[in-house]
Protein backbone atom coordinates (compact mmCIF):
# COMPACT_ATOMS: atom_id res chain seq x y z
CA UNK A 1 0.00 0.00 0.00
CA UNK A 2 1.12 3.51 -0.82
CA UNK A 3 1.53 6.14 1.95
CA UNK A 4 -1.20 8.77 2.35
CA UNK A 5 -0.30 12.18 0.99
CA UNK A 6 -1.74 14.75 3.38
CA UNK A 7 -1.78 18.10 1.63
CA UNK A 8 -1.76 21.43 3.39
CA UNK A 9 -3.54 23.88 1.12
CA UNK A 10 -1.84 27.27 1.11
CA UNK A 11 -4.02 30.21 0.14
CA UNK A 12 -2.72 33.66 0.95
CA UNK A 13 -1.80 33.41 4.64
CA UNK A 14 -4.32 30.68 5.34
CA UNK A 15 -3.26 27.13 6.17
CA UNK A 16 -5.92 24.46 6.00
CA UNK A 17 -4.44 22.11 8.59
CA UNK A 18 -4.24 24.05 11.83
CA UNK A 19 -4.55 22.76 15.37
CA UNK A 20 -6.70 25.78 16.21
CA UNK A 21 -9.20 24.97 13.45
CA UNK A 22 -10.85 21.95 15.08
CA UNK A 23 -14.60 21.39 14.92
CA UNK A 24 -16.46 19.35 17.52
CA UNK A 25 -19.63 18.89 15.51
CA UNK A 26 -20.35 18.55 11.83
CA UNK A 27 -22.21 21.04 9.67
CA UNK A 28 -24.03 18.39 7.64
CA UNK A 29 -24.92 19.07 4.03
CA UNK A 30 -24.72 16.66 1.13
CA UNK A 31 -22.00 18.71 -0.56
CA UNK A 32 -20.36 20.07 2.58
CA UNK A 33 -17.95 18.10 4.77
CA UNK A 34 -15.67 18.47 7.72
CA UNK A 35 -13.15 16.28 5.88
CA UNK A 36 -13.03 15.30 2.21
CA UNK A 37 -10.85 12.44 0.96
CA UNK A 38 -9.83 12.67 -2.70
CA UNK A 39 -9.29 9.26 -4.31
CA UNK A 40 -11.25 6.01 -4.24
CA UNK A 41 -8.49 3.45 -4.21
CA UNK A 42 -7.58 1.28 -1.24
CA UNK A 43 -5.61 4.04 0.49
CA UNK A 44 -8.43 6.54 0.06
CA UNK A 45 -11.15 4.26 1.37
CA UNK A 46 -8.97 2.90 4.18
CA UNK A 47 -8.22 6.48 5.25
CA UNK A 48 -11.86 7.60 5.08
CA UNK A 49 -13.05 4.49 6.91
CA UNK A 50 -10.48 4.82 9.70
CA UNK A 51 -11.09 8.54 10.09
CA UNK A 52 -14.84 8.14 10.45
CA UNK A 53 -14.66 5.08 12.70
CA UNK A 54 -12.51 7.05 15.17
CA UNK A 55 -14.38 10.36 14.81
CA UNK A 56 -18.05 9.52 14.43
CA UNK A 57 -19.10 13.13 15.00
CA UNK A 58 -17.44 14.23 11.76
CA UNK A 59 -19.13 14.56 8.39
CA UNK A 60 -16.72 12.83 5.99
CA UNK A 61 -16.96 12.53 2.23
CA UNK A 62 -14.92 10.91 -0.51
CA UNK A 63 -14.69 11.84 -4.19
CA UNK A 64 -13.48 9.53 -6.95
CA UNK A 65 -13.05 10.42 -10.61
CA UNK A 66 -14.15 6.97 -11.83
CA UNK A 67 -17.59 5.39 -11.46
CA UNK A 68 -16.52 2.75 -8.92
CA UNK A 69 -13.73 1.95 -6.42
CA UNK A 70 -10.25 0.54 -7.15
CA UNK A 71 -10.19 1.11 -10.92
CA UNK A 72 -6.46 1.75 -11.20
CA UNK A 73 -3.55 0.71 -8.94
CA UNK A 74 -5.75 -0.93 -6.32
CA UNK A 75 -7.19 -3.22 -8.99
CA UNK A 76 -3.99 -3.77 -10.96
CA UNK A 77 -1.36 -5.45 -8.81
CA UNK A 78 -0.01 -8.86 -7.85
CA UNK A 79 -2.49 -9.28 -5.00
CA UNK A 80 0.13 -10.28 -2.43
CA UNK A 81 -0.25 -9.94 1.35
CA UNK A 82 3.36 -9.15 2.25
CA UNK A 83 5.02 -10.21 5.49
CA UNK A 84 7.59 -7.42 5.93
CA UNK A 85 10.82 -9.02 4.74
CA UNK A 86 12.08 -6.34 2.38
CA UNK A 87 11.80 -3.04 4.21
CA UNK A 88 14.55 -1.27 6.12
CA UNK A 89 14.37 -2.19 9.81
CA UNK A 90 13.05 0.52 12.07
CA UNK A 91 11.13 2.32 9.34
CA UNK A 92 7.42 3.03 9.46
CA UNK A 93 7.00 0.94 6.32
CA UNK A 94 8.51 -2.13 7.98
CA UNK A 95 6.40 -1.70 11.11
CA UNK A 96 3.17 -1.09 9.20
CA UNK A 97 3.74 -4.06 6.88
CA UNK A 98 3.93 -6.49 9.80
CA UNK A 99 0.94 -4.91 11.53
CA UNK A 100 -0.96 -4.86 8.24
CA UNK A 101 -0.27 -8.55 7.68
CA UNK A 102 -2.16 -9.56 10.80
CA UNK A 103 -4.93 -7.00 10.36
CA UNK A 104 -5.49 -8.03 6.74
CA UNK A 105 -6.02 -11.69 7.64
CA UNK A 106 -8.25 -10.67 10.54
CA UNK A 107 -10.35 -8.35 8.36
CA UNK A 108 -10.67 -10.86 5.52
CA UNK A 109 -11.77 -13.62 7.89
CA UNK A 110 -14.29 -11.37 9.64
CA UNK A 111 -15.82 -10.20 6.35
CA UNK A 112 -15.64 -13.51 4.46
CA UNK A 113 -13.28 -12.11 1.84
CA UNK A 114 -11.60 -14.92 -0.15
CA UNK A 115 -7.90 -15.07 0.65
CA UNK A 116 -5.19 -17.67 1.05
CA UNK A 117 -2.11 -17.96 3.25
CA UNK A 118 -0.11 -19.76 0.57
CA UNK A 119 3.38 -18.69 1.65
CA UNK A 120 6.33 -17.42 -0.33
CA UNK A 121 9.77 -18.60 -1.39
CA UNK A 122 12.55 -16.15 -2.22
CA UNK A 123 14.88 -18.37 -4.22
CA UNK A 124 18.62 -18.09 -4.86
CA UNK A 125 19.32 -19.92 -8.12
CA UNK A 126 23.12 -19.78 -7.85
CA UNK A 127 25.84 -19.35 -5.23
CA UNK A 128 26.47 -15.70 -6.17
CA UNK A 129 23.05 -14.79 -4.71
CA UNK A 130 23.58 -16.46 -1.33
CA UNK A 131 25.01 -13.39 0.45
CA UNK A 132 22.12 -11.19 -0.70
CA UNK A 133 19.66 -13.87 0.37
CA UNK A 134 21.26 -14.18 3.81
CA UNK A 135 21.22 -10.39 4.23
CA UNK A 136 17.54 -10.35 3.33
CA UNK A 137 16.86 -13.11 5.84
CA UNK A 138 18.56 -11.12 8.61
CA UNK A 139 16.49 -8.09 7.65
CA UNK A 140 13.31 -10.13 7.91
CA UNK A 141 14.30 -11.38 11.36
CA UNK A 142 15.03 -7.84 12.52
CA UNK A 143 11.66 -6.67 11.19
CA UNK A 144 9.84 -9.44 13.02
CA UNK A 145 8.59 -11.26 9.93
CA UNK A 146 6.81 -14.27 11.46
CA UNK A 147 8.25 -17.79 11.19
CA UNK A 148 10.64 -17.20 8.29
CA UNK A 149 13.43 -19.69 7.81
CA UNK A 150 16.33 -20.44 5.48
CA UNK A 151 16.01 -23.72 3.62
CA UNK A 152 18.32 -25.64 1.29
CA UNK A 153 17.71 -26.82 -2.25
CA UNK A 154 16.21 -30.17 -1.26
CA UNK A 155 13.74 -28.52 1.12
CA UNK A 156 12.61 -26.16 -1.63
CA UNK A 157 11.16 -29.19 -3.42
CA UNK A 158 9.00 -30.09 -0.43
CA UNK A 159 7.27 -26.71 -0.72
CA UNK A 160 7.43 -26.09 -4.48
CA UNK A 161 8.05 -29.41 -6.29
CA UNK A 162 8.75 -27.73 -9.65
CA UNK A 163 11.08 -25.02 -8.33
CA UNK A 164 14.87 -25.30 -8.54
CA UNK A 165 17.30 -23.37 -6.36
CA UNK A 166 20.33 -23.69 -4.11
CA UNK A 167 18.78 -21.95 -1.09
CA UNK A 168 15.64 -19.99 -0.25
CA UNK A 169 13.82 -17.97 2.37
CA UNK A 170 10.46 -19.48 3.25
CA UNK A 171 7.82 -17.04 4.53
CA UNK A 172 4.79 -19.19 5.44
CA UNK A 173 2.52 -16.26 6.35
CA UNK A 174 2.74 -14.42 3.03
CA UNK A 175 -0.59 -14.69 1.26
CA UNK A 176 -2.82 -13.57 -1.58
CA UNK A 177 -6.04 -11.59 -1.85
CA UNK A 178 -7.86 -9.52 -4.43
CA UNK A 179 -7.21 -6.00 -3.15
CA UNK A 180 -10.00 -4.61 -5.32
CA UNK A 181 -12.44 -6.74 -3.31
CA UNK A 182 -10.92 -5.48 -0.05
CA UNK A 183 -11.31 -1.90 -1.29
CA UNK A 184 -15.00 -2.45 -2.04
CA UNK A 185 -15.51 -3.76 1.49
CA UNK A 186 -13.78 -0.66 2.87
CA UNK A 187 -16.14 1.46 0.77
CA UNK A 188 -19.15 -0.40 2.18
CA UNK A 189 -17.83 0.07 5.73
CA UNK A 190 -17.40 3.78 5.07
CA UNK A 191 -20.99 4.12 3.87
CA UNK A 192 -22.30 2.12 6.85
CA UNK A 193 -20.46 4.49 9.17
CA UNK A 194 -22.29 7.42 7.59
CA UNK A 195 -19.73 8.46 4.99
CA UNK A 196 -20.75 9.74 1.59
CA UNK A 197 -19.14 8.88 -1.76
CA UNK A 198 -19.32 10.96 -4.92
CA UNK A 199 -18.20 9.11 -8.04
CA UNK A 200 -17.45 10.67 -11.45
CA UNK A 201 -15.95 13.67 -9.66
CA UNK A 202 -12.56 14.53 -11.15
CA UNK A 203 -11.01 17.39 -9.22
CA UNK A 204 -10.09 20.39 -11.35
CA UNK A 205 -9.16 22.92 -8.68
CA UNK A 206 -9.18 23.90 -5.03
CA UNK A 207 -10.25 27.42 -4.09
CA UNK A 208 -10.50 29.33 -0.85
CA UNK A 209 -14.09 29.54 0.33
CA UNK A 210 -15.17 32.77 1.99
CA UNK A 211 -18.13 31.34 3.89
CA UNK A 212 -19.13 28.17 5.78
CA UNK A 213 -16.20 25.95 4.84
CA UNK A 214 -12.52 26.59 4.22
CA UNK A 215 -12.14 25.19 0.72
CA UNK A 216 -14.24 24.81 -2.40
CA UNK A 217 -13.38 21.73 -4.48
CA UNK A 218 -14.40 22.06 -8.13
CA UNK A 219 -14.72 19.17 -10.57
CA UNK A 220 -14.06 19.16 -14.31
CA UNK A 221 -17.85 19.24 -14.77
CA UNK A 222 -17.94 22.36 -12.55
CA UNK A 223 -19.66 20.63 -9.67
CA UNK A 224 -18.71 21.95 -6.23
CA UNK A 225 -18.06 20.41 -2.84
CA UNK A 226 -17.09 22.33 0.29
CA UNK A 227 -14.80 21.06 3.03
CA UNK A 228 -12.66 22.24 5.91
CA UNK A 229 -9.97 19.59 5.52
CA UNK A 230 -8.68 17.76 2.45
CA UNK A 231 -6.74 14.49 2.42
CA UNK A 232 -5.49 13.56 -1.03
CA UNK A 233 -5.04 9.87 -1.76
CA UNK A 234 -4.77 10.23 -5.51
CA UNK A 235 -2.34 7.43 -6.33
CA UNK A 236 -0.70 8.15 -9.67
CA UNK A 237 -2.36 11.58 -9.75
CA UNK A 238 -0.98 12.68 -6.38
CA UNK A 239 1.63 15.02 -7.84
CA UNK A 240 -1.02 16.77 -9.96
CA UNK A 241 -3.28 17.16 -6.93
CA UNK A 242 -0.38 18.58 -4.97
CA UNK A 243 0.20 21.21 -7.65
CA UNK A 244 -3.48 22.16 -7.54
CA UNK A 245 -3.15 22.96 -3.84
CA UNK A 246 -0.18 25.25 -4.37
CA UNK A 247 2.32 22.76 -2.97
CA UNK A 248 5.27 21.13 -4.69
CA UNK A 249 4.76 17.89 -6.70
CA UNK A 250 7.30 16.01 -4.59
CA UNK A 251 7.94 13.25 -5.22
CA UNK A 252 7.30 13.61 -8.95
CA UNK A 253 5.55 10.53 -10.32
CA UNK A 254 7.18 8.77 -13.27
CA UNK A 255 4.65 6.27 -14.67
CA UNK A 256 5.90 2.70 -15.01
CA UNK A 257 3.79 -0.04 -16.58
CA UNK A 258 4.03 -3.57 -15.24
CA UNK A 259 3.12 -6.42 -17.60
CA UNK A 260 2.14 -9.95 -16.55
CA UNK A 261 1.98 -13.25 -18.36
CA UNK A 262 -0.93 -15.50 -17.45
CA UNK A 263 -0.38 -19.17 -16.67
CA UNK A 264 -3.54 -21.05 -17.58
CA UNK A 265 -5.51 -23.08 -15.06
CA UNK A 266 -4.33 -26.35 -16.61
CA UNK A 267 -0.76 -25.41 -15.56
CA UNK A 268 -1.61 -23.65 -12.31
CA UNK A 269 -0.89 -26.78 -10.25
CA UNK A 270 2.82 -26.26 -10.99
CA UNK A 271 2.88 -23.29 -8.59
CA UNK A 272 1.68 -23.69 -4.99
CA UNK A 273 2.54 -20.26 -3.57
CA UNK A 274 4.43 -17.07 -4.33
CA UNK A 275 7.88 -17.66 -5.85
CA UNK A 276 10.20 -14.65 -5.91
CA UNK A 277 13.80 -14.17 -7.04
CA UNK A 278 16.48 -12.63 -4.85
CA UNK A 279 15.97 -8.90 -5.54
CA UNK A 280 18.68 -6.89 -7.24
CA UNK A 281 19.69 -4.25 -4.65
CA UNK A 282 20.50 -1.77 -7.44
CA UNK A 283 16.89 -1.76 -8.65
CA UNK A 284 13.71 -0.51 -6.89
CA UNK A 285 11.77 -3.67 -7.81
CA UNK A 286 11.31 -7.08 -6.21
CA UNK A 287 11.78 -8.90 -9.52
CA UNK A 288 9.57 -10.98 -11.79
CA UNK A 289 7.72 -13.57 -9.72
CA UNK A 290 5.05 -16.26 -9.84
CA UNK A 291 1.88 -15.28 -7.98
CA UNK A 292 -1.21 -17.49 -7.60
CA UNK A 293 -4.49 -15.63 -8.00
CA UNK A 294 -7.74 -16.07 -6.14
CA UNK A 295 -9.43 -16.89 -9.46
CA UNK A 296 -7.25 -19.99 -9.93
CA UNK A 297 -4.84 -18.53 -12.46
CA UNK A 298 -1.15 -17.79 -11.88
CA UNK A 299 0.57 -14.55 -12.87
CA UNK A 300 4.20 -14.29 -13.96
CA UNK A 301 5.46 -10.75 -13.65
CA UNK A 302 5.54 -7.87 -13.53
CA UNK A 303 8.25 -6.38 -15.66
CA UNK A 304 8.76 -2.61 -15.54
CA UNK A 305 8.33 -0.52 -18.69
CA UNK A 306 8.35 3.25 -18.95
CA UNK A 307 4.79 4.39 -19.70
CA UNK A 308 3.68 7.51 -21.53
CA UNK A 309 0.57 7.94 -19.39
CA UNK A 310 -0.35 7.36 -15.77
CA UNK A 311 -3.42 5.43 -16.85
CA UNK A 312 -2.69 4.20 -20.37
CA UNK A 313 -4.43 0.85 -20.92
CA UNK A 314 -4.76 0.80 -24.71
CA UNK A 315 -1.55 -1.24 -25.03
CA UNK A 316 -3.05 -3.96 -22.83
CA UNK A 317 -6.31 -4.03 -24.77
CA UNK A 318 -4.40 -4.47 -28.03
CA UNK A 319 -2.20 -7.26 -26.58
CA UNK A 320 -4.60 -9.86 -25.23
CA UNK A 321 -1.86 -12.22 -24.02
CA UNK A 322 -0.47 -9.63 -21.62
CA UNK A 323 -2.42 -8.89 -18.44
Image (spheres, rainbow, N blue to C red):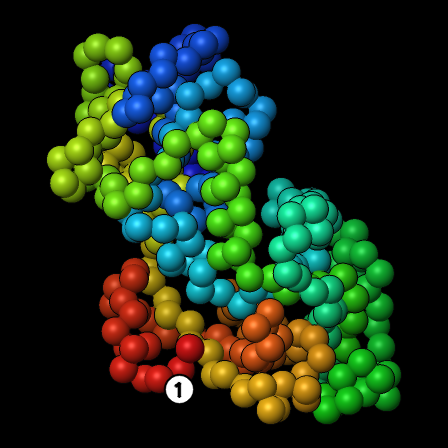
Q: Residue at x 39, y 86 (%)?
A: 321
Residue toward you, 269 or 284: 269
- Looking at the image, residue 182 lies above or below residue 322: above
Question: How many circles with numbers are drawn on the protein?
Answer: 1
Q: Within 10 angstroms of label 1, few (less than 14), some, or many (20 or more) residues?
A: few
Residue toward you, 122 or 235: 235
Left or right of residue 135: residue 291: left
The residue carrying mark 1 is 321
- Looking at the image, residue 287 lies above or below residue 265: above
Please state the horizontal and vertical placement of residue 47, each as a whole percent of the image.
50, 36
Please state the horizontal and vertical placement of residue 303, each as a whole percent of the image.
46, 77
Q: Quadrant of residue 159?
A: bottom right
Residue toward you, 236 or 228: 228
Q: Residue at x 35, y 22 (%)?
A: 33
Q: Quadrant of residue 224?
A: top left
Give the structural element (helix, strand or loop) at label 1: loop
Please state the horizontal and vertical placement of residue 101, each as a whole percent of the image.
69, 52
Q: Residue at x 54, y 86 (%)?
A: 263
- Of the 4 image quadrants, the one containing the C terminus is bottom left
- Looking at the image, residue 242 lies above or below residue 318: above
| Residue 240 seen in this snapshot | no
Left or right of residue 221: residue 292: right
| Residue 287 seen in this snapshot | yes
Please state the horizontal and vertical placement of residue 320, each as a whole percent of the image.
35, 84
Residue toward you, 231 or 12: 231
Amino acid sequence: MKPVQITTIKMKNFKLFSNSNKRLYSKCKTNSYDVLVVGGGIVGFATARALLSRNKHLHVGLVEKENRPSVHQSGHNSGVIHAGIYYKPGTMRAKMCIEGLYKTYEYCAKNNIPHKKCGKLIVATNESQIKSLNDLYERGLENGTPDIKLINGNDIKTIEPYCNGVRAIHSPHTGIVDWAVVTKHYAADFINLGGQITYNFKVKSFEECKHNRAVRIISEKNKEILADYIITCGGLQSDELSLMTGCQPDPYILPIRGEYLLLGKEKAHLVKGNIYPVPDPSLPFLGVHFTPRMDGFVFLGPNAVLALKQEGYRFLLENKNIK
